[in-house]
Image (tube, rainbow, N blue to C red):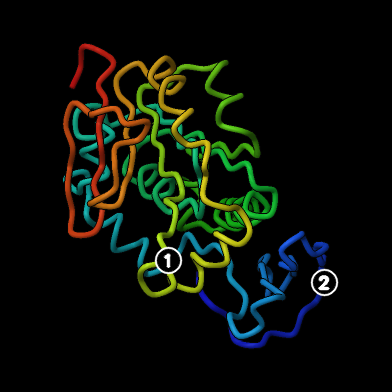
Amino acid sequence: MLPSSDPAITAEQTLGSDARGFSFALQENQGRLELRALHRPDYGAIWVDWGSAELRRRIAGGRKQLLARAVGLARKPDLELLDATGGLGRDAFTLAALGARVTLLERQPQIAALLADAHRRALADPDLAAVAARIELRSAEAADVLRDGRWDSIYLDPMYPHSGKTALPQKEMQIFRDLAGTDADADGLLEPALAAARLRVVVKRPLKAPWLASRKPGLDFRGTQARFDVYLTGSAT
């Protein structure tokens, strides 16, 4: 998802202002769907791009990268995975490119619309279609879906509250915080995820963030900016 220049808008759907005075517009431009935060006119438009150079680099990292190891792809290449907090879909697309079959959830309607547009474009792209075909996209609440299904691994990457003590997040993340909030109900997803996962639940957290629901994981994988907390639920590790 990249900031745009000032494109010529071919179609636009403006969403009404909320109680905070925030307003957004979904717009079609150059064959893709874009989102603008009208209350932040200097930010430009954002969209989901699953063919970006950044994603190609991540996919080239293979199954030895932290995310792939955390969800268990190294042990089970055809993993059935639920990404319950879809966001931009970058992690989901990376894991699908590495062999997983991914159910991707996003509850925020405008973000879900961006993901659906990215999925449509990827299915039409000969270089991306095989990966996109391994992704099922649903616009739904994770808590509702977790009650009705089983997956090998479940991945949670909830929005972490911004403390206000540091510089503003990158523009893209700030817009998403304005639109979707901070996933204050994320703690409540851990128990149903544990019940629905055959093998493990993986939670992505900032390095110094507390454990989700104050529950210590069985193991974690640490990078320079984030860690993946792993809760094992089955016999395979």
Q: Position of residue 28 (x, y in %)?
A: 74, 69
Image-based side of 197 in relation to 137, left or right: left
Can residue 212 be seen at all in this image of the molecule?
Answer: yes
Against 72, is 107 above or below?
Answer: below
Q: Residues within 10 Å of mark 1 (few under 14, many from 20)?
A: few
Q: Image quadrant of residue 236?
A: top left
Q: Residue at x 29, y 48 (%)?
A: 209
- Few, some or many residues within 10 Å of mark 2 (<14, 14–19, 20+): few
Q: Which mark is residue 139?
A: none
Depth order, front residue of 29/66: 66
Front-most of 128 and 67? 67
Q: Does the rendering let one see residue 24? A: no
Q: Is residue 105 above or below residue 3?
A: above
> Mark 2 near mark 1, Cβ–Cβ under 8 Å?
no
- Residue 164's tag is 1
Residue at the disc numbered 2 = 11
Q: Position of residue 42 (x, y in %)?
A: 61, 85
Residue pictured at 79% horizontal, 64% vertical: 17
Label 2 vs label 1: CA separation? 36 Å
Q: Position of residue 154 (x, y in %)?
A: 39, 29
Q: Residue furthest top?
A: 235
Say which quadrant the C terminus sits in. Answer: top left
Amino acid type, callout 2: Ala
In the image, residue 207 lies at what x, y percent? Answer: 23, 52
Secondary element at image label 1: loop
Q: Nearer the viewer, mark 2 or mark 1?
A: 1
Q: Residue at x 64, y 78 (%)?
A: 40
What is the secondary structure assignment of the residue under circle 2? Answer: strand
- Residue type at numbered disc 1: Gly
**Which of the two labelled residues, at mark 2 and mark 1, occupies the earlier sequence position?**
2
